[in-house]
Every structure is written in C-alpha cells, then in structure tokens.
Image (cartoon, rainbow, N blue to C red):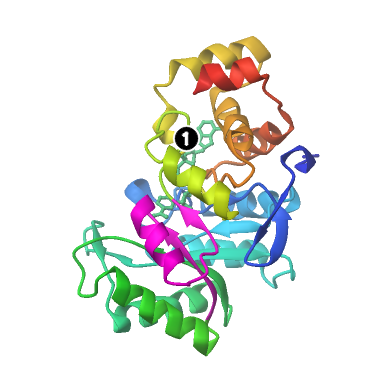
Amino acid sequence: MTDLSNAGTISVAGRTVPRFGFGTMRLTGPKIFGEPADRDECVAVVRAAYDGGVRVFDTAWYYGPDVASPIVKDALSPYADDVVFVSKLGGARTDRGGWKPATSPDELRAGAERECRLLGVDHLPVVHLRWMPGGEADFDGMLATLQSLVDEGTIGAIGLSTVSLEQLDAVVAAGTTVATVSNPYGPGNRDDDALLARCGELGIPFLPYFSLVSSQQHEALDTVAQEIGATPSQVAIAWQLQRSPVVLPIPGTSKTAHLAENLAAAAITLTPEQVEAVG
Ligand SMILES: NC(=O)c1ccc[n+]([C@@H]2O[C@H](COP(=O)([O-])OP(=O)(O)OC[C@H]3O[C@@H](n4cnc5c(N)ncnc54)[C@H](OP(=O)(O)O)[C@@H]3O)[C@@H](O)[C@H]2O)c1
C-alpha cells in the first residue's frame, strides 16, 4: 500500500491534490510514437497510480499520437470527481514521428477537441500552452486562443510549458492567471532554478519533466541511493519533493514495478546533507 502523505498536498487550479502526479508520455511505442509494447500493462500502471493516490495526470493528444490519453481513459473512466487532467497544446507530430509546432487558433482548437474526445471528457481542467517556436501563431497569439477556450468553458485554467522566466513574468504582469508551469528540471538539470524560485514566490505548482531521464548520469544520486538503500530514481523523486513545496513531480513509466518504486519515493525524507549532495 503506497502512502503519499509525506509528499503533502498542493492546489492545482483550485483543486487540492496529493503533491505527486503521473506523466503519460511513456505509455507509447519507442520515441513516443505508436502503441506501447504491452498496452494492458500500461492500463494497469495508470490504474495503479490512481489507486496509489495520484490524482494529477499530465497527458497530451500527441503522445503516440492518440495513444496515451486513450490508455488513461481505459484505465480510469468513468472518472472519479477528483481526477485532474493537465493536458497541453502547441505541438503536433509529423507522419514519421517527428515533432512540430501547432499554434494557430484552428490547430489549438482542434487539439483541445481531440484531447477531449480521446479522454472522453468535455472539459480539460488545466492546459499547458506548450511553447514551441516556429508555428503560425506567436506566444501571445497562442495565449489569446487558449484564453478564448477558457472563456468558452473547454479549458478550466491555463498553464505554461517550456517557457523562460521572462515569458512567465510577462504573462503574470499582463494579469493572466497561470495555473501551473512545466519545464525540464531535475537533479541533473538545474537550468530553471530561477524559474522555479519565481513559481515558489507566486505559489504556482511547478511540474518538472524529464526529471529522471536528465538525471541518469548524475553520480550523486547513486551515492545517496546506496547510502539509504533506495534506487537512484527514488532519490531523484524525493529530492524534487524537498527542493520546493511548489514542485509537483510527474515521473513517467510504462511499468507497474517502476510505478510502485516511484510512489514509494514519496515516503523518503532525505537529510539536508543528502539534498545538498544531490544538487
Ligand atoms: N510539457 C512538456 O512539453 C513535456 C515534455 C516531456 C514530458 N512531459 C511530461 O513529463 C512526464 C515525465 O517526463 P518523461 O516521462 O519524459 O521522463 P522521466 O519521468 O524523466 O523518465 C521516464 C523514463 O524513466 C524510466 N523510469 C521511470 N521510473 C523508473 C524507475 N523507477 N526505474 C528505472 N527507470 C524508470 C521510464 O522507463 P519505463 O517505462 O521502462 O519505466 C522512462 O523511460 C511525461 O510522461 C510527460 O507527461 C511534458
């Protein structure tokens, strides 16, 4: 039985949730393209995450594409009231599995409708403006379209992803409420320390992505892991939880054994010396 109580709770778009989420991007084939090798296992992973206390599921229609979100639907629908989807718009896939921006009003609207259909919902509680330069619309244009979707009731709240500190500050200064921020971050990638600090000042939940993959060569994790009899992934997750009270980890996995290991990391409390040693 997992216990996420040590991780505490956080408010995401007005919903109080355990401070431990799940990222669905790995519920796909290699390179986030096509069906996963074992779909039944992936459905079981998502169900086990919910049963283990996770309520925030970070997903996107373009994982697969059209693969990860239907797995979430098969695992969890009919949905309990406490499930909080955090989706994202701004990207799309090429026929060969590459990534491309999709930022125009039509593309963003079609993406929101597609995600709703895949998840089997008519409302997305939080949607990240996933900044990917090079599309038809610029950042402000994307924000305007997402705001329209909020006004129309398709989206509950807007988050920002893969943004700079300057972009966050500009959006906040313009009076837009930012529900969440999600950037690459972890013990092995501290590029956004300043952005995380600003999220802390503003009380905005920060969802680090690539937190495990960017920490694979981080030797300090191995050292601390050996010291406390945990795995490096567990130490990376425990470190995130202690790094800042606004961090909401969203580790991704396609395996129930890894999911159990990751959830168990919530119960680990690193000493200040161990936190310092990791990063
Ligand atoms: N906003 C954005 O633009 C954006 C971009 C990328 C990702 N994301 C979100 O962030 C989430 C997290 O990022 P991520 O999934 O790319 O990377 P991640 O959480 O850093 O790591 C996932 C990888 O680590 C492996 N893993 C997980 N738990 C493990 C464990 N206990 N032991 C060993 N290996 C383990 C997984 O493989 P197995 O499947 O074999 O466990 C997978 O390959 C994504 O799922 C997605 O929802 C958002």
Query: What range of the chain is rendered magenta?
Result: 155-182
Q: Residue 162: x, y in percent? A: 36, 53
Tell me the residue at 62%/66% (across/down). 13
Check the image and report above or below for 205 versus 2: below
Q: Residue 94: x, y in percent? A: 22, 63
166 part of magenta stretch: yes
Q: Is residue 139 left or right of residue 56?
A: left
Label 1 neighbour load within 10 Å: few <14, some 14-19, many 20+: many
Residue 166 sits in quarter? bottom left
Q: Can the viewer see residue 201?
A: yes
Residue at the farthest bottom position: 152
Q: Residue 47: x, y in percent? A: 67, 55
Q: Quadrant of the N terminus?
A: top right
For badge 1, the amino acid type reads Gly
Q: Residue 37: x, y in percent? A: 45, 48
Q: Is mark 1 within 8 Å of ligand 1?
A: yes
Tell me the residue at 60%/11% (across/down). 226
Q: Secondary structure at mark 1?
A: loop
Q: Out of 84 and 120, give the one closest to the viewer.
A: 84
Q: Which residue is mark 1?
A: 186
